[in-house]
Image: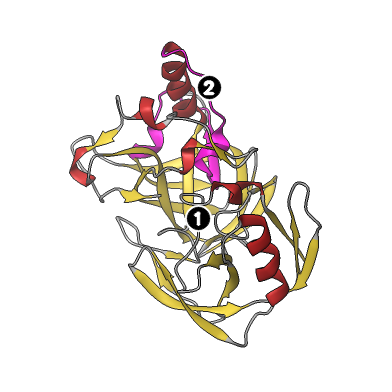
Amino acid sequence: MSVAKVAALAYYPVKGLAGIPTETAEVGPTGLLNDRLFMLVQPDGTFLSQRKLPAMATLRAALAGDALQLSAPGAPDLEVEIRYDGKRRDVSLFEKWFGQGVVQDPAADEWFTARLGAPAALVRVTPEHERPGWGAHRGLTGFGDAHALMITSQASLDGLNARILERGADAIPMNRFRPNLVISGWDEPHTEDKVLRMTAGAVEIGYSARGIRCAVPTVDQATGTKSGPEPTRTLATYRREPAYGGGVSFGVKGAVLAPGNITVGDEITVHEWIPDDADPAPATRS
């Protein structure tokens, strides 16, 4: 097997918005620094995502000290001061987690509402936020779906795209899967499914569960529009998870077992593999 390395890193300051590629990152208990610290919610506190509002993919939020800089194609930029604590509101994720978020600047709410054509309010995790994940390794997460890290491999994407091309459709980029960590150097697709515990740079990562994919991978991340049945159509031919509702899987969710720094090019060291006949944790929708 070739030497596996960190091929790409990305974090998503606001859940559901465009990702920010980075060459190096500090990784804490809840994942890459600044990953999914904010999210947009509906008036009832339910989170918003590309599942229903694919245009979120074209909105960008960048951290600049104690400010959040918002931008979108054809729209005026906006910079708002981050509110780390203060007024709270009830928020929820998937009707499974109910907590609170810190209310941010109303100007940000107006900006997002105008861009999305639907009521949207921006919240940040509270200072005491401590939300556990679940699976073989639980760990913690911010406003991520259920875990600290989304991990994919280049071999898995290459294998998927080969199948998509055979069907006469266009290959898709990795950003459709919105990973935090992409691994190169593995010869076999979906090797990440088999890793129970590994080190990337100074960060130790534990497998939590396979990621069951929702409709987001069908969204073109550059245009914020649904682009057809791929990759879900092709994944359905070989990555069905009958034990978990028949959804399709791609990539795995991970927990941070030991925080540290990680850099593109760092070597991946696998410390423990999942036995072929074992299923250490259920899959989880991503």
Name the residue carrying label 2. Answer: 171
Residue 261 screen position, x and y as percent:
62, 55
Q: Is residue 285 above or below residue 127?
A: above
> Where 209 falls versus 249 (above or below)?
below
Q: Between residue 159 and residue 230, name the one nearer to us.
A: 230
| Camera-nearest residue between 22 and 166 | 166
Residue 5 shows up from this direction:
no
| Place of residue 155 in the rendered image (x, y in percent of width and height, measured from the top left) | 47, 26
Residue type pointed to by label 1 = Ser
Q: Residue 236: horizontal and vertical position, in percent?
A: 31, 29
Which numbered tag is attached to residue 172?
none
* Nearer to us in this view, 112 or 91: 112
Is 179 in the magenta?
Answer: yes
Looking at the rendered structure, the kind of residue marked 2 is Ala
Q: Secondary structure at mark 1?
A: loop
In this rendering, would 85 be left or right of 89?
A: right
